[in-house]
Image (cartoon, rainbow, N blue to C red):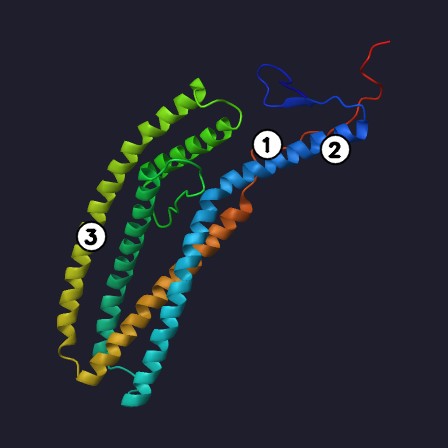
Amino acid sequence: MKIAPVSKMATVINLEYMDVLPARGEAIVNDLIRVYNEAAVKDKNRMAASTMSFVEERLRIVTRELSEVEKEVARFKTNEGIVDISEQSKMFLGSVQDNDAKLNEANMQLSVLESIEKYVNGKTEGVNMVPATLGLSDPVLLELVNKLYETELEKEKLKKTTGANSPSLTALNRQAEMLKPGIRENIQSQRSNLEAGKARLLSANDRFMGMLRSVPGKERALLEVSRQQAIKNNIYTFLLQKREETALAYAAAISDSRIVDGAETAGVPVSPER
């Protein structure tokens, strides 16, 4: 097999393969490129696959919890003879709903930060445990995690063709170790901000609960289960949206290379020379 660029500045390469059977040679080259492109797409999709796995697991839990709380609402209305809540209670529910949604988002981001931290601290071999970055919007952290993932991926590829003491492998190991402190520091900073925001949201919820004391007992109980229903429903809707976004990203991934011309046998034998 010979692989070379068509010129020094070109982004196109030529692949040549010699075989005594022309058809077999063509098949080998075509299949080599097919597998290469599939591997490139698979590498790109590792992050999306991890996110999808995270979302699916959370969806299973939330779906079960939402079903249970919906049954509880229906059972409470039947047993207590309450059809609906008053306007005052609706105002309370509307006020607290946005707060609960922000709390859910903060908890989700804290959970993702924890998974990234485990990935960084426990990383030894392999690239299968790449974490989901669901809900994170900090570009610095996302870039650092992607760089670490790409470095680990390069290490795994290099290990298949070089020895453990290879200078290239040593350089990649050093690069990965240099990235980790920055990720840990960023995680700590974001965790502190999220915890502070979460404390403010919990304080606001305490004020809302003070409003609830003026609501009659039965209606207050219905309001509590209705609130839990709204919380679970918001999480469920958020996860469904993220699943669709991740599925689209997964399906849209393409290889960075494309075939200009498929393998084609030369018209005459190339060896041996007569």
3D distance between C-alphas at marks 2 and 3:
59 Å
Q: Earlier in the sequence, mark 1 or mark 2?
A: 2
**Is residue 30 placed above or below 46 in the rendered structure?**
above
Q: Residues within 10 Å of mark 1 (few under 14, many from 20)?
A: few
Where residue 220 appears, as percent x and y from the top left, is 20, 79
Q: In the image, which disc is placed on residue 257?
A: 1
The kind of secondary structure element at disc 2 is: helix
Q: Farthest residue in the right direction?
A: 274
The kind of secondary structure element at disc 3 is: helix
Name the residue nearer the viewer: 194 or 113. 113
Look at 37% across and 46% down and name the residue there: 133
Where residue 49 appears, as percent x and y from the top left, is 48, 48
Whether residue 137 is visible here, answered yes or no, is no
Amino acid found under the numbered disc labelled 3? Gly
**Is residue 206 placed above or below 166 in the rendered structure?**
below
3D distance between C-alphas at marks 1 and 2:
19 Å
